[in-house]
Amino acid sequence: MVLSLDSTLLEKPAVVNSVTVAGENDQLAATWIVPTPAADENKTATSFVVSLYSVDWPDVPLTTINTANQHYTFTRLSNGVGYRVGVKAKNDAGSSSEVISGVGTPTVPTFRPPYTS
């Protein structure tokens, strides 16, 4: 039996950039940018671990999801409460360090009466 080693080894992905959040009615939309590995396909992210944190409890995630997208919207949140979102890039070698967003706050939409002439 002959064993051969591949000259390329998979590495953990680089951390994501620019995690941003925007509050909507009962929702918080998060987006992030994935760095392009400079000629190193072995660090490519295949999915993302996205966690929602309350500003009051910053060390314990309220919920965590996995997604292949570079965005996610958390729903059924409390308006007027501050939240942060943490994102880790992931591949078969493991996960990157978590990057935390600034504070986002879901808000009640402003009521605009219909226009009358």
Image (tube, rainbow, N blue to C red):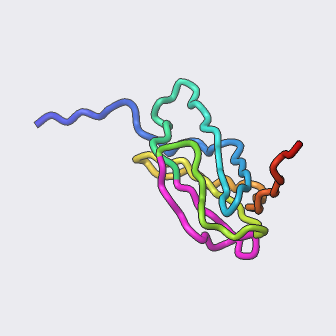
Measured as percent of width and height from the top left, residue 73 is found at: 60, 53
Residue 83 occupies quadrant: bottom right
Residue 84 occupies quadrant: bottom right
Measured as percent of width and height from the top left, residue 102 is found at: 77, 55
| Magenta run includes residue 61 | yes
Q: Residue at x 75, y 75 (%)?
A: 56
Quarter of the rendering occupied by the N terminus: top left
Q: Residue at x 47, y 30 (%)?
A: 41
Residue 59 occupies quadrant: bottom right
Quarter of the rendering occupied by the C terminus: top right
Residue 50 relative to residue 4: left or right: right
Measured as percent of width and height from the top left, residue 70 is found at: 57, 42
Q: Does residue 12 lie above or below 61 as drawn?
A: above
Q: Does residue 89 lie above or below 26 as drawn?
A: above
Magenta segment boundaries in residue numbering: 49-67
Number of labels in the image equals 0
Q: Does residue 100 lie above or below 17 as drawn?
A: below
Residue 10 relative to residue 33: left or right: left
Closer to us: 52 or 8: 52
Q: Residue at x 60, y 59 (%)?
A: 74
| Magenta run includes residue 94 | no
Residue placed furthest toward the top: 39
Residue placed furthest toward the front: 117
Closer to us: 111 or 115: 115
